[in-house]
Amino acid sequence: MAVIKFDGDLELDPAGYELRRSGRPIRLERIPMVILLFLLERRPELVTREQIVDRIWGQGVFVDAGNSINGAIRKIRVALRDDAEEPRFIRTITGKGYRFIANPIEEPAAALPAEDIPTLPQPAEPRIGH
């Protein structure tokens, strides 16, 4: 999978699961990385919070998704040096979701296939009884 380059010095290597600025790795935890890859995959469409929950945790999983998504978006913005008030990369659509708005300088020949975007492992089913 080809490296996606944007904003002059940022690179996202989906295959290597790495974000870089001027060739230097930028630390980004797993959930924020999965969300960033998902937003890029769906660019320039709106990605709803429900779609993010389905992609990361799957249907029927009960987690505090609202706070988890908010925290992950905040970490992505810090890594990209983005500003929620005047975004260059991720625009919040209040009450709906998010949109990746930056145009890549170079992008892979094909869109990021959904099967290449990692998901988190599903929790084991709770056991009832002994």
Image (spheres, helix red, strand yellow):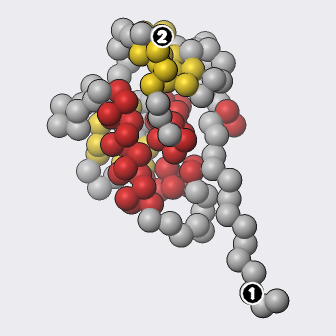
Q: Position of residue 99 (x, y in %)?
A: 37, 37
Q: Position of residue 115 (x, y in %)?
A: 69, 37
Q: Is residue 5 left or right of residue 95?
A: right
- The part of the image, by quadrant, that contains residue 13 is top right
For mark 1, what is the residue? Answer: 128
Real-space CA distance between mark 1 and mark 2, rounded to the nearest whole angstrom: 50 Å
Q: Is residue 9 visible?
A: yes
Query: Which quadrant of the rendered structure holds the N terminus?
Result: top right
Of residues 28 and 112, the one drawn nearer to the viewer in this rendering: 28
For mark 2, what is the residue? Answer: 23
Query: Which quadrant of the rendered structure holds the C terminus?
Result: bottom right
Q: Amino acid at mark 1?
A: Ile
Q: Position of residue 11 (x, y in %)?
A: 47, 16
Of residues 50 and 119, the one drawn nearer to the viewer in this rendering: 119
**Image depth: mark 1 or mark 2 in front:** 2
Q: Position of residue 43 (x, y in %)?
A: 45, 30
Q: Amino acid at mark 2?
A: Gly
Q: Residue at x 46, y 15 (%)?
A: 24
Q: Residue at x 62, y 36 (%)?
A: 117
Q: Residue at x 49, y 20 (%)?
A: 25
Mark 2, residues whose alpha carbon is within 10 Å: few (<14), some, or many (≥20)? Answer: few
Q: Secondary structure at mark 2?
A: loop
- The part of the image, by quadrant, that contains residue 103 is top left
